[in-house]
Image: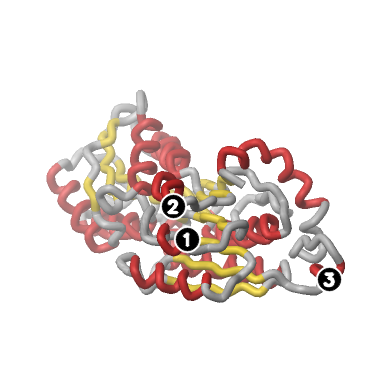
């Protein structure tokens, strides 16, 4: 099924929870299929990042809950584009029932995905496969599941607006130059700032805590009037909090991050980090497996599923820690 045709299938999703996905989790059409667990191959980014550790936990939990055979392979790090592709090739060679992919870049898994047999579902999570590259090789992505990063950036702007005065200058620390996720979050933050505060020119820190600390330190020295700093992920936000503390400006400079990793929640609780816009890699991973099994059972999927994003502040951080890695507020996915 093409992505365009999948757009017409959103109404079918509501039937999944009460029908084929209930009970067995594999959604088989016959009694024989009910007794044969589906096989799922999953390839994600490196487990050196806690975000992807949580994603793997969600994948494994969903496989256990749905009684599916799930094999998970992870890249060794953010630069391991070729290694990640090789791991996907190894899973494809096993002829599994469906595949879930979280590519390092928009193109590094495309050639490998072209080797997936026709009719085998492919679920793309978190980082999108390049649409043009996939189309050129005849790859049919069953659905995309991930965070609406522009919405996350806009939610960060809403949060920042409640922490700084109107017209305040706010620093912006982005990820890697050219990275789609960073660009979307920064763009959403910029749009959300309009008429409220003034975001400064983005400084890229390569998703790195130490680089973000250096960048934030430079900002604070060059512009003592800065009232807040937004970082496009929590690891960089933690670096920013270090720079703010070193400058003796804790409590005077608001710091907002994105992701909701455990270290960020702890920083919110102790007051070093003002807030984080929490996305839920655990939920994204679980939804990926659920969608994969639904598609493998012949069910139509929506073209896109937006995973939950929720703001964590001192008001709700204790509850967020207690529920981690699941959402602080209940979330009902479309796959039951």
Q: Quadrant of the C terminus?
A: bottom right
Q: Which marked residue is nearer to the observer: mark 1 or mark 2?
A: 2
Mark 2: secondary structure: loop
Q: Who's the residue at 73% across and 58% down the image?
A: 297
- Say which element carries label 3: helix
Residue 312, placed above or below residue 184: below
Secondary element under disc 1, as helix, strand or loop, is helix
Query: Residue 118, image x and y in percent?
Result: 58, 58
Q: Residues within 10 Å of mark 3 (few under 14, many from 20)?
A: few
Residue 69: image location, x then y, percent: 66, 74
For residue 32, which numbered disc appears in the image? 3
Q: What residue would you read off at disc 2?
A: 137
In-front residue for pair 63/69: 69
> Mark 1 and mark 2: span between their CA atoms?
9 Å
- Residue at image mark 1: 113
Whether residues under marks 1 and 2 lie with C-beta atoms below 8 angstroms apart, the answer is yes
């Amino acid at each position: 099924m093409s992505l365009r045709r999948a757009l017409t299938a959103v109404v079918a999703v509501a039937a999944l929870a009460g029908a084929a996905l209930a009970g067995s989790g594999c959604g088989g059409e016959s009694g024989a299929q009910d007794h044969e667990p589906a096989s799922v191959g999953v390839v994600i980014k490196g487990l050196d990042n806690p975000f992807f550790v949580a994603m793997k936990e969600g994948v494994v939990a969903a496989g256990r809950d749905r009684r599916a055979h799930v094999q998970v392979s992870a890249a060794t790090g953010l630069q391991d584009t070729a290694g990640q592709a090789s791991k996907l090739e190894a899973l494809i060679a096993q002829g599994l029932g469906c595949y879930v992919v979280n590519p390092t870049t928009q193109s590094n898994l495309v050639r490998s995905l072209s080797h997936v047999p026709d009719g085998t579902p492919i679920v793309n999570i978190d980082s999108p496969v390049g649409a043009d590259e996939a189309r050129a090789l005849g790859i049919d992505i069953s659905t995309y599941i991930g965070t609406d990063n522009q919405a996350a950036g806009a939610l960060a702007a809403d949060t920042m607006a409640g922490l700084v005065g109107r017209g305040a200058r706010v620093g912006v620390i982005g990820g890697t130059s050219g990275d789609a996720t960073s660009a979307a979050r920064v763009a959403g933050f910029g749009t959300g700032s309009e008429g409220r505060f003034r975001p400064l020119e983005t400084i890229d820190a390569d998703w790195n805590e130490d680089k973000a600390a250096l960048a934030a330190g430079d900002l604070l020295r060059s512009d003592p009037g800065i009232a807040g700093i937004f970082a496009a992920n929590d690891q960089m936000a933690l670096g920013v909090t270090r720079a703010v503390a070193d400058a003796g400006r804790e409590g005077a400079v608001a710091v907002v991050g994105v992701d909701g990793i455990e270290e960020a929640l702890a920083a919110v609780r102790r007051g070093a980090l003002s807030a984080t816009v929490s996305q839920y890699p655990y939920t994204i991973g679980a939804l990926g497996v659920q969608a994969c099994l639904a598609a493998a059972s012949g069910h139509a999927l929506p073209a896109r599923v937006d995973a939950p994003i929720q703001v964590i502040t001192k008001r709700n951080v204790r509850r967020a820690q207690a529920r981690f890695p699941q959402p602080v507020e209940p979330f009902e996915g479309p796959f039951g």
